[in-house]
Amino acid sequence: MKKLNAILIIVLSSIFSGSLLASIQVNFDYKTFLIPNEGPYVETHLNFIGGTMKYARNTNGLLQANIEALIIFRNLERIVAYEKINLTSPETMDSLFVDFLDIRRFTLASGSYFLELSITDLNLENSTPLMYEEIVEIPAYNLLTISDIILISGWGPTEESNDLSRSGYDVLPRVSSVYSGDDNQLAFYTEAYHTDKFFSDGKEFIISTSIENAYFTKVIEESVNYKKFSPNSVIPLIQTKRINELQEGVYNLTIEIRDRENVVQSSKTLEFIKTSGNNTNSSTGENKEVLDEFSVYVDQLKDEDQLYAHLLSLEPIADVYDLRTIRSTISNDRSDDDLEVIKTEKTSNENIQLQIESNAKLKNMQNFLYKFWVEKSPEGPLQSWLEYLSRVEAVDAEFGNRLKKGFETDRGRIYLEYGSPNTRVIRKHDTGANPYEIWHFYQAKEFANKRFVFMDTDQVLNDYRLIQSDMIGEVRNDNWIDMILSGVQTNRVNNQGQGALDKTTFSDGARNIIKDLYLNPR
């Protein structure tokens, strides 16, 4: 899930030869930058969580982890860069384990690459490697632009060049975009390129930074900062933002280059998450663990059709902003023709581009599912999603048909949005009436005593349509009893929905029966 820029990958423990194995936890991230007159490069960050690997005694008699990491970049089927890394943790005499960080830089031309990462615990017999794949897009950086943004834990002036050095600063990456309730500050590093060419008159320009809610695109006014700069080939930018007042949710950190008329000429955005939980341990806080657990789950969802259905199934509980995002995300789904090309074993540039686009769509859908449940249920997103998914499956079994999934039907939507009704009247064989159902809720969201009336419109597909409700925002129909008796949907809808109950002329007792069932649920 590169869209969130720093996702904890967890290899769950398994059992071999009767012994319980340790589980590796590692944050992985990558960023792209430019070296003027040389070209772009990718920087990879591996942050191993202390105590999550197997530790063995070394020749000094101290405990130490031993890890092998293999990083490969492929263009088409050809390896263009790779590095096999042997890493050892800091030594320790007891269980006071600390995290450790590895940074690598790969000079690569602009374009699209497949990144493959393999991590093996060398102290663990029969260790199954952790595998991770990602599509990496390296921009040309030949225009006015901004590099990727690194969240950082610390920084200072460079005294002697080292792996942390960049543009005169030593920058320590923070390889996680999740901030807990007791994190008061967000710090970041980025670089602006070619301002000297774009602002060729040499006059000052502005770089603005801000934080906004990712869903509502509402800027947090207190976070806005404007700073003037003189043009240069590379401008490093380090800033901090106060985040102690932010509510739990998903946010965007935005950097913009503005001209002297305050018009945005280039921008870069990074998403981060603020949770309400306390992080008593920076590496293994409980809230962080549940977020990371959900991240692992979502990263394993590789079937686009399944993810497509998952996103659609969220519509009954999504607000108007989420609905807009869901429909925007899935509206760009790949065509059947693209699928057939991607499934072939050809290695043409066209196929690679289609594969890249397919992976990008997959990541977009994964990213939305992750963000939706982290914001909705930050203390337990995976559990909440699995509980909801079980309800979706139950709705599909009860209300689905050969043309629609259960959540796409009116009864399925109401069930998922408001829960199980307290009473459900099912009438299929009333003389002179079409099959219908009346659902009654003692409590529907914040409202008490709400009713929903559904009618089987074709008596073939088991697709009951909602024709009347006294719930705010749902259909209110003056002629719903007539519809049940005639089987014709008149679509004569008003804001009262009461006229059908006020009629006093009946051809038979059917109207009285329907009215009684509606007003007196049982």
Image (cartoon, grey):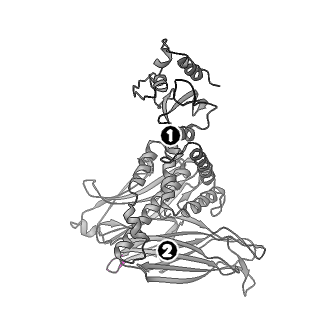
Percent across and percent down for residue 338 are: 38, 65
The secondary structure making up most of the magenta span is loop
Q: Alpha carbon of mark 2 to alpha carbon of mark 1: how far?
A: 57 Å
Q: Which residues are magenta?
A: 35-39
Percent across and percent down for residue 263 are: 27, 54
Percent across and percent down for residue 174 are: 53, 66
Q: Is residue 70 above or below residue 285?
A: below
Which amino acid type is shown beneath numbered disc 1? Val
| Residue 41 among those drawn in magenta | no
Residue 102 located left or right of residue 322: right
| Residue 77 can be seen, yes or no | yes
Q: Nearer the viewer, residue 100 or 514?
A: 514
| Residue 37 among those drawn in magenta | yes
Residue sitting farthest toward the right: 18
Q: Residue at x 44, y 45 (%)?
A: 323
Provide the secondary structure element on which disc 2 rests.
strand
Q: Nearer the viewer, residue 142 or 411?
A: 411
Provide the secondary structure element on which disc 1 rests.
loop
Residue that carries the numbered disc 2 in the rendered image: 44
Q: Is residue 389 above or below residue 338?
A: above
Which one is in front in this view, the residue at disc 2 or the one at disc 1? 1
Residue sitting farthest toward the bottom: 59
Q: Residue at x 57, y 52 (%)?
A: 275
Circle 2 packing at 10 Å, graded few (<14), some (14-19), many (20+), is some
Percent across and percent down for residue 431 are: 55, 24
Quarter placement of the C terminus: top right
Residue 297 position by quadrant = bottom right
Which amino acid type is shown beneath numbered disc 2? Thr
Residue that carries the numbered disc 1 in the rendered image: 460
* Mark identifier at residue 332: none
Q: Residue at x 28, y 53 (%)?
A: 262
Residue 379 located left or right of residue 332: right
